[in-house]
Image (spheres, rainbow, N blue to C red):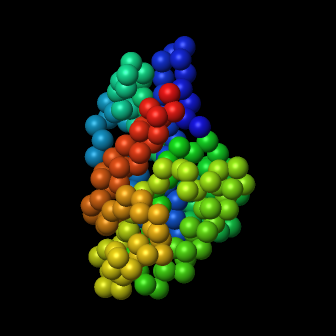
Amino acid sequence: MTIVNYDTKEINCKIVYYGPPLSGKTRNLKTIFERTPSTNRGELICLQHDDERTCYFDFLPLFLGQLRGFTTRLHLYTVPGNAVFDSNRRMILKGVDGIVFVADSRRERLDENLESMDNLRKNLAAHGYDLERIPMVVQYNMRDFPTAMSVDDLAVVLNPSNRPQFTANAQTGDGATETLKAVSRLVLKDLIREK
Ligand SMILES: Nc1nc2c(ncn2[C@@H]2O[C@H](COP(=O)(O)OP(=O)(O)OP(=O)(O)O)[C@@H](O)[C@H]2O)c(=O)[nH]1
Ligand SMILES: [Mg+2]
Protein backbone atom coordinates (compact mmCIF):
# COMPACT_ATOMS: atom_id res chain seq x y z
CA MET A 1 0.00 0.00 0.00
CA THR A 2 2.99 2.28 0.59
CA ILE A 3 3.72 4.45 -2.41
CA VAL A 4 7.27 3.79 -3.56
CA ASN A 5 8.31 5.86 -6.56
CA TYR A 6 11.48 4.43 -8.09
CA ASP A 7 11.79 7.27 -10.64
CA THR A 8 11.83 10.06 -8.07
CA LYS A 9 13.25 7.80 -5.32
CA GLU A 10 10.49 8.63 -2.86
CA ILE A 11 8.63 6.61 -0.26
CA ASN A 12 5.33 7.88 1.19
CA CYS A 13 3.70 6.01 4.07
CA LYS A 14 0.18 6.67 5.34
CA ILE A 15 -0.49 6.42 9.07
CA VAL A 16 -4.04 6.84 10.37
CA TYR A 17 -5.00 7.75 13.95
CA TYR A 18 -8.29 5.97 14.68
CA GLY A 19 -10.44 5.77 17.81
CA PRO A 20 -13.66 6.75 19.58
CA PRO A 21 -15.01 10.32 19.77
CA LEU A 22 -12.86 12.84 21.63
CA SER A 23 -10.17 10.29 22.57
CA GLY A 24 -7.33 12.70 21.68
CA LYS A 25 -6.51 11.87 18.03
CA THR A 26 -6.24 15.47 16.86
CA ARG A 27 -4.31 16.39 20.02
CA ASN A 28 -1.68 13.75 19.13
CA LEU A 29 -1.05 15.39 15.75
CA LYS A 30 -0.90 18.85 17.33
CA THR A 31 1.77 17.60 19.75
CA ILE A 32 3.81 16.02 16.94
CA PHE A 33 3.52 19.27 14.95
CA GLU A 34 4.70 21.38 17.91
CA ARG A 35 7.64 19.08 18.67
CA THR A 36 8.94 18.57 15.15
CA PRO A 37 11.40 21.11 13.71
CA SER A 38 9.86 23.02 10.78
CA THR A 39 12.52 21.55 8.46
CA ASN A 40 11.02 18.09 9.06
CA ARG A 41 7.34 18.80 8.71
CA GLY A 42 4.74 20.55 6.57
CA GLU A 43 1.68 22.41 7.77
CA LEU A 44 -0.93 20.78 10.00
CA ILE A 45 -4.30 20.87 8.30
CA CYS A 46 -7.31 20.45 10.63
CA LEU A 47 -10.71 20.14 8.97
CA GLN A 48 -13.00 20.62 11.93
CA HIS A 49 -16.13 22.33 13.20
CA ASP A 50 -16.07 25.41 15.45
CA ASP A 51 -16.22 23.13 18.50
CA GLU A 52 -12.90 21.55 17.37
CA ARG A 53 -14.54 18.23 16.50
CA THR A 54 -12.92 16.71 13.42
CA CYS A 55 -15.48 16.43 10.61
CA TYR A 56 -13.28 15.27 7.74
CA PHE A 57 -9.69 14.63 8.81
CA ASP A 58 -6.46 16.20 10.09
CA PHE A 59 -3.32 15.87 8.01
CA LEU A 60 0.35 16.35 8.86
CA PRO A 61 3.22 15.44 6.50
CA LEU A 62 6.58 14.56 8.11
CA PHE A 63 9.94 14.22 6.35
CA LEU A 64 12.08 11.43 7.76
CA GLY A 65 15.09 12.00 5.51
CA GLN A 66 16.80 9.29 3.45
CA LEU A 67 16.10 5.59 3.82
CA ARG A 68 18.30 3.42 1.59
CA GLY A 69 18.59 6.30 -0.86
CA PHE A 70 14.86 7.09 -0.89
CA THR A 71 13.40 10.36 0.39
CA THR A 72 10.95 9.09 3.00
CA ARG A 73 7.79 10.82 4.20
CA LEU A 74 5.07 9.91 6.66
CA HIS A 75 1.59 11.24 6.02
CA LEU A 76 -0.31 11.35 9.31
CA TYR A 77 -4.12 11.46 9.25
CA THR A 78 -6.79 11.41 11.94
CA VAL A 79 -10.37 10.31 11.38
CA PRO A 80 -13.46 11.92 12.93
CA GLY A 81 -14.72 10.07 16.01
CA ASN A 82 -18.25 11.28 15.35
CA ALA A 83 -20.23 8.39 13.80
CA VAL A 84 -22.03 10.80 11.45
CA PHE A 85 -18.80 10.93 9.45
CA ASP A 86 -18.26 7.20 9.11
CA SER A 87 -18.02 7.35 5.32
CA ASN A 88 -15.13 9.85 5.69
CA ARG A 89 -13.40 7.46 8.07
CA ARG A 90 -13.70 4.67 5.55
CA MET A 91 -12.31 6.84 2.76
CA ILE A 92 -9.32 7.94 4.83
CA LEU A 93 -8.38 4.29 5.44
CA LYS A 94 -7.80 3.70 1.74
CA GLY A 95 -4.12 2.90 1.22
CA VAL A 96 -3.33 2.88 4.95
CA ASP A 97 0.08 1.50 5.99
CA GLY A 98 -0.14 1.80 9.76
CA ILE A 99 -2.70 2.56 12.44
CA VAL A 100 -2.53 4.22 15.84
CA PHE A 101 -5.61 3.24 17.82
CA VAL A 102 -6.14 6.06 20.34
CA ALA A 103 -8.24 4.60 23.14
CA ASP A 104 -9.90 6.57 25.91
CA SER A 105 -8.80 4.91 29.16
CA ARG A 106 -11.90 5.92 31.14
CA ARG A 107 -14.10 3.05 32.28
CA GLU A 108 -17.24 4.88 31.13
CA ARG A 109 -15.79 5.00 27.59
CA LEU A 110 -15.02 1.29 27.31
CA ASP A 111 -18.04 0.51 25.11
CA GLU A 112 -17.12 3.33 22.74
CA ASN A 113 -13.58 1.98 22.45
CA LEU A 114 -14.90 -1.46 21.59
CA GLU A 115 -17.36 -0.04 19.06
CA SER A 116 -14.59 1.95 17.43
CA MET A 117 -12.30 -1.10 17.16
CA ASP A 118 -15.15 -3.04 15.60
CA ASN A 119 -15.88 -0.16 13.23
CA LEU A 120 -12.18 -0.03 12.27
CA ARG A 121 -12.21 -3.72 11.42
CA LYS A 122 -15.35 -3.29 9.27
CA ASN A 123 -14.12 -0.18 7.47
CA LEU A 124 -10.82 -1.90 6.67
CA ALA A 125 -12.69 -4.95 5.40
CA ALA A 126 -14.65 -2.70 3.04
CA HIS A 127 -11.31 -2.07 1.27
CA GLY A 128 -10.36 -5.74 1.48
CA TYR A 129 -7.84 -5.16 4.29
CA ASP A 130 -7.45 -7.38 7.34
CA LEU A 131 -6.79 -5.58 10.63
CA GLU A 132 -4.61 -8.46 11.84
CA ARG A 133 -2.22 -7.91 8.92
CA ILE A 134 -1.87 -4.15 9.27
CA PRO A 135 0.84 -2.67 11.54
CA MET A 136 -0.91 -1.10 14.52
CA VAL A 137 -0.01 0.30 17.90
CA VAL A 138 -2.48 0.99 20.70
CA GLN A 139 -2.33 4.18 22.74
CA TYR A 140 -4.20 4.39 26.06
CA ASN A 141 -4.91 8.09 26.36
CA MET A 142 -6.63 10.08 29.14
CA ARG A 143 -4.49 8.49 31.85
CA ASP A 144 -4.96 11.58 34.07
CA PHE A 145 -8.62 10.79 34.79
CA PRO A 146 -9.53 9.06 38.09
CA THR A 147 -11.70 6.54 36.24
CA ALA A 148 -8.84 5.41 33.96
CA MET A 149 -8.78 1.60 33.84
CA SER A 150 -5.55 -0.31 34.37
CA VAL A 151 -3.51 -0.95 31.24
CA ASP A 152 -3.72 -4.70 31.86
CA ASP A 153 -7.54 -4.60 31.89
CA LEU A 154 -7.68 -2.41 28.79
CA ALA A 155 -5.20 -4.63 26.94
CA VAL A 156 -7.31 -7.75 27.47
CA VAL A 157 -10.12 -6.30 25.38
CA LEU A 158 -8.39 -3.77 23.13
CA ASN A 159 -5.08 -5.45 22.42
CA PRO A 160 -5.50 -9.23 22.40
CA SER A 161 -2.87 -9.56 19.63
CA ASN A 162 -0.20 -7.94 21.80
CA ARG A 163 0.62 -5.01 19.55
CA PRO A 164 3.04 -2.41 20.92
CA GLN A 165 1.11 -0.30 23.41
CA PHE A 166 1.69 3.03 25.14
CA THR A 167 0.08 5.17 27.79
CA ALA A 168 -0.45 8.84 27.01
CA ASN A 169 -1.83 12.13 28.12
CA ALA A 170 -2.43 13.87 24.84
CA GLN A 171 -3.22 17.06 26.75
CA THR A 172 0.38 17.36 27.99
CA GLY A 173 1.83 15.52 24.99
CA ASP A 174 3.21 12.62 27.01
CA GLY A 175 3.42 9.45 24.94
CA ALA A 176 2.71 11.03 21.53
CA THR A 177 6.27 10.79 20.20
CA GLU A 178 6.86 7.27 21.52
CA THR A 179 3.62 6.11 19.88
CA LEU A 180 4.53 7.62 16.52
CA LYS A 181 8.06 6.18 16.62
CA ALA A 182 6.68 2.71 17.30
CA VAL A 183 4.15 2.73 14.46
CA SER A 184 6.73 4.18 12.04
CA ARG A 185 9.15 1.43 12.96
CA LEU A 186 6.51 -1.23 12.29
CA VAL A 187 5.53 0.30 8.94
CA LEU A 188 9.11 0.68 7.71
CA LYS A 189 10.02 -2.84 8.86
CA ASP A 190 7.06 -4.14 6.83
CA LEU A 191 8.21 -2.16 3.82
CA ILE A 192 11.78 -3.47 3.94
CA ARG A 193 10.42 -7.02 4.26
CA GLU A 194 8.24 -6.54 1.15
CA LYS A 195 11.13 -5.29 -1.03
N1 LIG B 1 -7.35 15.72 30.39
C1 LIG B 1 -7.03 15.26 29.17
N2 LIG B 1 -7.56 15.86 28.10
C2 LIG B 1 -7.23 15.37 26.89
C3 LIG B 1 -6.33 14.28 26.72
N3 LIG B 1 -6.19 14.06 25.39
C4 LIG B 1 -6.96 14.96 24.76
N4 LIG B 1 -7.59 15.76 25.66
C5 LIG B 1 -8.54 16.84 25.37
O1 LIG B 1 -9.75 16.23 24.92
C6 LIG B 1 -10.39 17.04 23.92
C7 LIG B 1 -10.61 16.21 22.66
O2 LIG B 1 -9.35 15.94 22.05
P1 LIG B 1 -9.21 15.80 20.48
O3 LIG B 1 -7.78 15.54 20.19
O4 LIG B 1 -9.86 16.93 19.78
O5 LIG B 1 -10.09 14.49 20.26
P2 LIG B 1 -10.39 13.75 18.90
O6 LIG B 1 -10.19 12.30 19.17
O7 LIG B 1 -9.62 14.33 17.78
O8 LIG B 1 -11.96 14.07 18.74
P3 LIG B 1 -12.87 13.87 17.41
O9 LIG B 1 -12.12 14.45 16.27
O10 LIG B 1 -14.13 14.59 17.67
O11 LIG B 1 -13.07 12.40 17.29
C8 LIG B 1 -9.46 18.24 23.70
O12 LIG B 1 -9.93 19.31 24.48
C9 LIG B 1 -8.12 17.74 24.20
O13 LIG B 1 -7.27 18.78 24.62
C10 LIG B 1 -5.79 13.67 27.89
O14 LIG B 1 -5.02 12.69 27.84
N5 LIG B 1 -6.18 14.19 29.08
MG1 LIG C 1 -10.21 15.09 15.99
Expressed as whole percent of the image width and height from the top left, the position of residue 68 reads 37, 22
Expressed as whole percent of the image width and height from the top left, the position of residue 191 reads 48, 35
x 55%, y 21%: residue: 5
Q: Can residue 42 be spotted in the picture?
A: no
Q: Can residue 71 be spotted in the picture?
A: yes
The quarter of the picture where residue 150 lies is: bottom left
Expressed as whole percent of the image width and height from the top left, the position of residue 74 reads 45, 38
**Image-based side of 111 in relation to 148, left or right:** right
Expressed as whole percent of the image width and height from the top left, the position of residue 167 reads 32, 66
x 43%, y 75%: residue: 156
x 55%, y 56%: residue: 132
Q: Nearer the viewer, residue 190 or 76?
A: 190
**Image-based side of 95 in relation to 103, left or right:** right
Seen in the picture, residue 67 relative to 162 is either above or below; the reply is above
The quarter of the picture where residue 188 lies is: top left
Q: Give the quarter of the figure containing the N terminus.
A: top right
Seen in the picture, residue 12 relative to 6 is either above or below; the reply is below
How many callouts does the rendering have?
0
Q: Nearer the viewer, residue 172 or 187?
A: 187
Q: Nearer the viewer, residue 84 or 93?
A: 93
x 42%, y 59%: residue: 163
Q: Nearer the viewer, residue 108 or 166?
A: 166
